[in-house]
Image (cartoon, grey):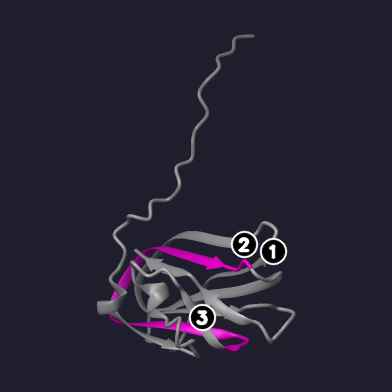
Amino acid sequence: MRKKIIEPVRQQPASLDAEWLNLESLAEVEITSEHADHPIEFALLPGQAAGWRAAEPGKQTIRLLFSHPQRIERIWLHFLESGAERTQEYVLRWSADGGKSFQEIVRQQWNFNPRGATTEVEDYHVELPAVTVLELSIIPDIGDNSVTASLEQLRLA
C-alpha cells in the first residue's frame, strides 16, 4: 500500500472585513423595544461595542425595511450571554414583496451557559436576490418569558 502524509486543510475564520451593507443609508429599522443605553444602532452599525438590548422581556422583533430591494449573500449574527443559562430561539425570514409574505431562512435554538457557551456566532451564506424586508425574531428563553433579548451584531453583505 502506498501512502502519503499531507498537510491538513486549515479553515480560515470568515472575514469580518467583508463589504457589509451600509444599513444606516439603505434601511429603516422597526423594533418591538430597545433599552435606552443599548439602542439598535449599537448592533447594526460598525464601531459600536455595546450591542442592542430589549427594554422589555419576552419575544422581540427586529425588522429591516429596505428602501430599494437588496441582494443579500451573507448574514452574520453575533449573540452574547455570559450571565445566565438559557435556551434562545430565533427565526430569520425575508420578504421580496414589502412584508406581504415571508420565506424562512433559518430557525435555530442555542443553549447559553455561563460556564462555557456564552457566545453564538452564525455566518449564513445565502442567495436572496431582492430583499425588501429582513426580519429577526428572538425568543430569549423558550422556557421563561421574563428574560430580555439581546443582539451584539448583525451584518449583511
Q: Secondary structure at mark 1?
A: loop
Residue at mark 2: 118
Residues under labels 1 and 2: Cα distance?
6 Å
Answer with mark 3 or mark 2, whichever residue precedes in sequence: 3
Give me the disc on residue 113. Answer: 1
Place of residue 86 in the rendered image (x, y in percent of width and height, measured from the top left): 70, 72
Q: Quadrant of residue 154?
A: bottom left
Residue nearest the viewer, comparing 37 with 20: 37
What amino acid is found at the position of numbered circle 1 in the picture? Asn
Residue 85 located left or right of residue 9: right
Residue at mark 3: 53
Place of residue 141 in the rendered image (x, y in percent of width and height, measured from the top left): 68, 77
Place of residue 31 in the rendered image (x, y in percent of width and height, measured from the top left): 46, 88
Give me the disc on residue 156. Answer: none
The answer to whether the residue labelled 1 contacts the one labelled 2, judged by CB atoms less than 8 Å apart, is yes
Q: Secondary structure at mark 3?
A: strand
Up-down relation of residue 124 to residue 10 (above or below): below
What amino acid is found at the position of numbered circle 3 in the picture? Arg
Q: Residue furthest right?
A: 143
Residues under labels 3 and 2: Cα distance?
16 Å
Residue nearest the viewer, comparing 120 with 27: 120
**Magenta segment boundaries in residue numbering:** 56-82
- Write the residue at 38% across / 73% down: 44
What amino acid is found at the position of numbered circle 2 in the picture? Thr
Q: Badge 1: how crowded within 10 Å, few (<14), some, or many (20+)?
A: some
Q: Badge 2: how crowded within 10 Å, few (<14), some, or many (20+)?
A: some
Q: Badge 3: how crowded within 10 Å, few (<14), some, or many (20+)?
A: many
Q: Quadrant of residue 130?
A: bottom left
Answer with mark 3 or mark 1, whichever residue precedes in sequence: 3
The answer to whether the residue labelled 3 contacts the one labelled 2, judged by CB atoms less than 8 Å apart, is no
Place of residue 37 in the rendered image (x, y in percent of width and height, measured from the top left): 45, 83
Q: Quadrant of the C terminus?
A: bottom left
